[in-house]
Structures are given as C-alpha cells and as structure tokens.
Image (cartoon, grey):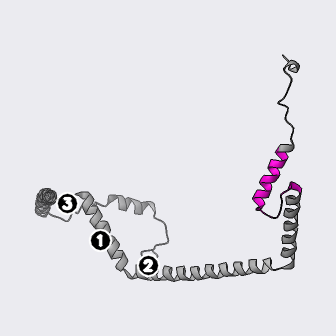
Amino acid sequence: METRQQGFLDSEPLREADEDLVSEVNLTNSIMTEEEREEIQQELAKLEDEISTLRQVLSSKEKQHAELKQKLGITPLTEFKNNISRGWQDMQSSTAYKKTSETLTTAGQKTTAAFSTLGSTITRKFGDMRNSPSFKSFEEKVENTVTNIKTKVGTSGSGGSFEDVLSSAANASSQETPTNNLMDTTERPC
C-alpha cells in the first residue's frame, strides 16, 4: 500500500467508497445517553418557557410605555420631530460636517471672487471694444441711418428717440396707403 499524507485540501476526488462512508455517518450524537438526552430536552423546554414569559413581560411593558406617552401627550409625530432635530444637531457637531462646511464656505468665497473678476474683465473688454475704431465706425453708421430715417419721415428738428422715429414712420406709411371704403352703392356686386 502506498502511504500518502492526507490534508484538508486533498487533490484527489472522492471515490465511491468514500461517498458510502459519508452517507453512513449518523448525524445525531449517538454517544449521548438517554438520560443526557432527557436532561437536554428538559432544559430546552425550560428555556422556551422563559422566552415565552419574557415576550409576555415585554409586551406588557410596551403597552405601559405607550400609555404613559399618551398621558404625556407625546405622539409619534412629536417623537419623529425630536429624533430628526436631535440627529441634525448631532450631525452639525460632527467633525465631518464641520470640515465639509468649511470647505464649502471657502469654495463659495473663491467662486464669488472668480465671478467678480470675470465680471470686471468682461466690463473692461466691452469698454475696450466700444473705444475701438471698428465699433466707432459702426456707431457712426447707425447714427447716420437714424438721421436719414428722421429726415425721410419728416420730423422737424432732432427731437425724439429711435422709438418715436419708428412710430412716426409707421404713421406716415399708414397715411399714404389708400383706402377703398368709399364705393358707390350702385357699383357693388350683388
């Protein structure tokens, strides 16, 4: 016979003889005597009785607890509010909350500074653009166009805003449109 060392991690698969041995093992403890078995069953029954008694006592105490809360006017909603409030206070006093709050405050300050700088830069760039020769040329063309419109519409002087000029132009064009409301009644079709 060959000798081999058996370990927990046996690399050989189980053989049919091994499977037969496993199936014949009695899973109940056959070493136990009848007296020991009876004693354990009595102890188990005693524990089950104690558990039942404790459940009854707990149920009684829970009822008493609910009655006392009701007498004090403590409702489930009140308890919920108190728990939320207590939880919020606990969270605010935690170091994680404090660190997060400080970080967010710092980030907010830096963001505000960045937007302020961005706004200043945009304002400066618009100022630079307005002073540029191409913008001045565009501005002169717009002014010339407005003056031409005022002249064509027939406004006297330089009074009025651009909206007034457009309104005058609209009135002038509506007066120039002929209306066909004056018809001879004999010429109307039947």
Secondary structure under badge 1?
Answer: helix
In this view, the residue in front, 43 or 103, is: 103
The residue under label 1 is 86
Task: Please state, as top left, top right, bottom left or bottom right, where the N terminus lies in the image.
Answer: bottom left
> In the displayed structure, does residue 111 sit left or right of residue 165?
left
Secondary structure under badge 3?
Answer: loop
The residue under label 3 is 74
- Image location of residue 27, percent across then percent down: 28, 60
**Is 166 one of the magenta-colored residues?**
yes
Distance of mark 2 from mark 1, alpha carbons? Answer: 63 Å
Please name the amino acid that badge 1 sits on. Arg
In this view, the residue in front, 88 or 114, is: 114
Identify the mark nearer the N-term, 2 or 1.
Answer: 2
Identify the mark nearer the N-term, 2 or 3.
Answer: 2
Identify the mark nearer the N-term, 1 or 3.
Answer: 3
Range drawn in magenta: 152-174
Q: Residues within 10 Å of mark 3 (few under 14, many from 20)?
A: few
The residue under label 2 is 5
Give the residue displayed 49% in from the left and 69% down from the top: 12
